Image (cartoon, rainbow, N blue to C red):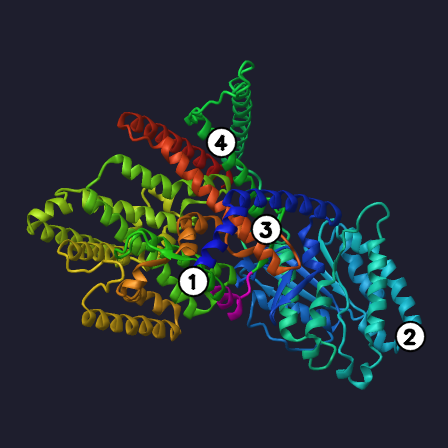
């Protein structure tokens, strides 16, 4: 009864909500969101610097999230690189002095807060040629005005950045009187034109006063109330913003520290001065405001202009535009022709004549339609991660943000289960299911920022290794059983693996190695192919006649293992091979191939393990040692129970070891050798019981069939800033934002999968003569791409 209700319910859902209708809904959502964001930017402005300086919230306790953009955490070397030959001046009271110390500690963490607090404090890094000064002017008065006025003179060197602010001393000395506020207004009015003049050549920031925690204030500071502070802030904002009559003031208001203080002032030691973590956040905001536009960090989207289009991107835009126009013309012509040929009514009989056979869709139409769809999808990619239309936020990890979604998808996966068409070990439905749930876990891992939690990181490494294990198992099984080493098979696999990545490299201006998993799978596929295709070609049909061929294949695998070990422990040889042109254009990242070597080395044995497992399994299957009937255990009951027990123990042992990891580098060193333990344990647990082998999750399998597209698309339309942040389509509601962005992301990935399959049939034909012509065209395309890329690189340098 329950099964019947389940099937009826699923049929009802599929009847009213198909994949096609989901994609239409996703398209409508994208258009509405794009219009809303454009209207918002037109109304509120598109300057992310203003958002960085004035708004934000805390993620957790100490992670500050600016509104709509991402903040980069600057390292010492980056800060020095940005501020080389720069002079920064802080002018004000003890709170500005605190900000000065926190700013200097980004450059030199050993700098001590010592000496006379009520005097000027200089700092200079002669090696980096960075100069930062604190000038003690606790009141906005003639003394501060004179200091600022000196810088306005043409003969005097001006600081590149000026950070000023004061008010609490005026409130304290004058006991919070109204006369003091009036004098403050007069003084800041006289200083405003000077600051405005300086702001034409330097970056000038006026720091608004932070609130105080009145309960902790000492008796001689009780007159400093939040009401007084608000009055002084209002005066400063009003006067400085109205210092220019017809245009916007160039003096920037640093009001974000107020928001930070509202959340953290309770941790203050004296009720007046902020805790160190809050000061560090304010200092990092200052660093982002000034340095992001200079260094352009990937995860620092605040204050960064949209990157200019490269020559290759412009050509790609032209190509997709022409494809869209071409398809529209083709569609209009085809529609008019169809209308003319439409069935007409026989006037004599009153019956309608119908065309039974629909004309076949031409390859040109499929080609134009595919590139038309792809062009629209790539426009969405660009809008999400390059055009600064949509917002971005930093990741913030908590255990709940990772484990709760895992529980959700587990429940859904169990709910949608069906019987398998075949009950063999690692049958197609099962491998799709395996890919699907692994991909969903990896997606949750990326968006939750769980890489900071080492036990989760180590388990995710096993999932990545399991993908590569399937690569070894799947391709070895195909070549061993089919014996098809033809060019068509190789080209089909390479096209399906690399098509989307090549397009993204062009559209998003990213190197091939940036999408590291695809180069990894591509290289391993070629390794498997070369290993098995080279003389002597040993396949199952040949080996069945003579056991000697099994020994020959094992020798091939042993030689492959020897080559892997040599390259793994000879970084120099590995880098020499992949630094050769044109391989270097594919595998270099940031000018070297170290990242590629690290990625390859991290899972260097697992593809070999997959090939070896496939060989042993197929040999056992051929000798009918395994029982793969429906509902039957894989081995005899005693053997099955023993192997099942060993598998569960091995699986849990690995998890305990991974959870106890303390050092990522040490665990990464052991991972290539031990990851296969948990992979094999999972395979045996999943396949030894006959009932487990007979069912699969159609929910997970659906995602497994588009797992490659999901993995690649997440870089730009689910995550943001090249995976460093999160895409924000709906600000202010994280849960709704994740639901909407995920829905669009999955629809896009599914559509790209279909486009890739359609284009693969046209671009990689089965006819060898046609295929060779296409390959020549593809080779010419890549040669042109290499030439254009070299021209771009020279122009950048």
Q: Earlier in the sequence, mark 4 or mark 2?
A: 2
- Against 19, is 639 above or below? below
Q: Separation of disc 2 and disc 1 at Cα?
A: 70 Å
CA gap, disc 3 to disc 4? 41 Å
Q: Position of residue 726 (x, y in %)?
A: 56, 56
Indicate the secondary structure of the residue bearing disc 2.
loop
Work out how far the residue at label 4 is from the one at label 2, CA to CA, in angstroms: 74 Å
Q: Residues within 10 Å of mark 3 (few under 14, many from 20)?
A: some
Residue 139 is labelled as none
Report the mark closest to the observer, 3 or 4. Answer: 4
Please provide percent x and percent y for residue 143. Answer: 82, 66
- 738 w.r.t. 792: above or below: below
* Residue segment shown in magenta: 395-406
- The dot on residue 294 is 3
Q: Which residue is mark 2?
A: 177
Q: CA distance from mark 1 to mark 3?
A: 51 Å
Classify mark 1: residues with Cα within 10 Å, few (<14), some (14-19) or many (20+).
some
In this rendering, the label closer to the viewer, 4 or 1: 1
197 relative position to 416: left or right: right
Residue pointed to by mark 4: 369
Q: Quadrant of residue 423?
A: bottom left
Residue 414: mark: 1
**Distance Cα–Cα, label 4 vs label 1:** 37 Å
Q: Say which element carries label 1.
A: helix
């Amino acid at each position: 009864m329950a099964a019947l209700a389940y099937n009826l319910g699923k049929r009802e859902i599929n009847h009213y909500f198909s994949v096609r209708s989901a994609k239409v809904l996703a398209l409508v959502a994208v258009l509405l969101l794009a219009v809303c964001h454009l209207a918002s930017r037109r109304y509120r402005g598109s300057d992310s610097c203003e958002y960085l300086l004035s708004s934000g919230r805390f993620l957790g306790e100490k992670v500050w999230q600016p509104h709509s953009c991402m903040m980069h955490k600057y390292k010492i070397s980056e800060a020095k690189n940005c501020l080389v030959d720069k002079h920064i001046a802080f002018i004000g009271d003890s709170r500005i002095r605190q900000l000065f110390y926190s700013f200097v500690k980004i450059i030199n963490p050993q700098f001590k807060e010592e000496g006379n607090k009520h005097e000027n404090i200089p700092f200079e890094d002669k090696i980096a040629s960075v100069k930062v000064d604190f000038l003690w002017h606790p009141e906005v008065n003639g003394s501060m005005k004179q200091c600022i006025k000196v810088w306005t003179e043409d003969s005097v060197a001006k600081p590149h950045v000026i950070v000023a602010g004061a008010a609490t001393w005026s409130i304290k000395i004058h006991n919070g009187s109204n006369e003091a506020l009036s004098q403050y207004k007069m003084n800041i009015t006289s200083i405003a034109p000077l600051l405005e003049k300086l702001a034409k050549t330097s970056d000038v920031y006026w720091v608004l006063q932070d609130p105080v925690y009145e309960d902790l204030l000492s008796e001689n500071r009780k007159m400093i109330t939040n009401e007084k502070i608000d009055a002084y802030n209002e005066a400063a904002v009003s006067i400085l913003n109205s210092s220019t009559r017809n245009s916007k003031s160039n003096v920037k208001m640093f009001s974000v520290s107020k928001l930070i203080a509202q959340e953290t002032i309770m941790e203050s030691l004296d009720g007046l001065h902020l805790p160190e973590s809050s000061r560090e956040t304010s200092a990092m905001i200052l660093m982002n405001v000034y340095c992001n536009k200079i260094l352009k960090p990937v995860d620092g989207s605040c204050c960064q202009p949209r990157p200019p289009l490269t020559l290759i991107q412009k050509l790609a835009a032209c190509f997709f535009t022409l494809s869209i126009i071409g398809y529209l013309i083709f569609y209009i012509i085809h529609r008019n022709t169809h209308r003319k040929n439409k069935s007409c009514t026989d006037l004599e009989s009153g019956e309608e004549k119908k065309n039974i056979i629909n004309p076949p869709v031409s390859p040109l139409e499929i080609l134009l339609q595919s590139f038309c769809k792809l062009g629209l999808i790539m426009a969405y990619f660009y809008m999400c991660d390059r055009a600064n239309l949509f917002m971005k936020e930093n990741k913030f990890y908590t255990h709940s943000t990772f484990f709760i979604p895992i529980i959700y998808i587990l429940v859904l996966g169990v709910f949608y289960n069906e019987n398998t068409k075949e009950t063999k070990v690692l049958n197609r439905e099962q491998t799709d299911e395996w890919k699907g749930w692994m991909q969903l876990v990896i997606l949750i891992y990326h968006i939750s920022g769980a890489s900071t939690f080492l036990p989760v990181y180590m388990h995710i490494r096993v999932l990545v290794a399991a993908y590569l294990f399937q690569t070894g198992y799947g391709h070895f099984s195909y070549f061993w059983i089919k014996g098809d080493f033809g060019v068509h098979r190789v080209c089909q696999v390479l096209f399906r693996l690399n098509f989307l990545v090549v397009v993204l490299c062009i559209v998003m201006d990213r190197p091939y190695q940036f999408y590291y998993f695809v180069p990894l799978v591509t290289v391993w596929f070629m390794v498997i192919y070369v290993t098995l295709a080279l003389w002597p070609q040993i396949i199952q049909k040949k080996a069945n006649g003579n056991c000697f061929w099994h020994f020959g294949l094992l020798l091939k695998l042993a030689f492959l293992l020897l080559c892997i070990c040599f390259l793994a422990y000879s970084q120099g040889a590995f880098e020499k091979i992949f630094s050769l042109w044109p391989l270097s254009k594919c595998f270099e990242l940031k000018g070297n191939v170290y990242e590629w070597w690290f990625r390859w080395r991290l899972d260097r044995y697992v593809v070999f393990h997959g090939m070896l497992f496939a060989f042993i399994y197929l040999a056992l299957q051929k000798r009918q040692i395994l029982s793969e009937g429906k509902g039957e255990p894989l081995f005899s009951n005693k053997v099955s129970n023993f192997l099942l027990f060993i598998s569960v123990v091995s699986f849990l042992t690995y998890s305990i070891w991974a959870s106890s990891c303390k050092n990522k580098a040490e665990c990464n060193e052991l991972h290539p050798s031990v990851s296969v333990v948990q992979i094999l344990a999972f395979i045996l647990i999943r396949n030894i019981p006959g009932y487990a082998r007979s069912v699969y999750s159609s929910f997970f399998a659906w995602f497994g069939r588009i797992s490659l597209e999901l993995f690649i698309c997440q870089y730009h339309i689910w995550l943001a800033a090249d995976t460093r942040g999160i895409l924000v389509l709906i600000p202010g509601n994280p849960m709704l934002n994740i639901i909407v962005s995920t829905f669009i992301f999955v629809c896009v990935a599914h559509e790209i999968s279909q486009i890739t399959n359609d284009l693969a049939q046209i671009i990689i034909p089965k006819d060898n003569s046609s295929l060779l012509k296409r390959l020549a065209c593809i080779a010419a395309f890549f040669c042109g791409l290499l030439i254009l890329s070299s021209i771009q690189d020279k122009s950048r340098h």
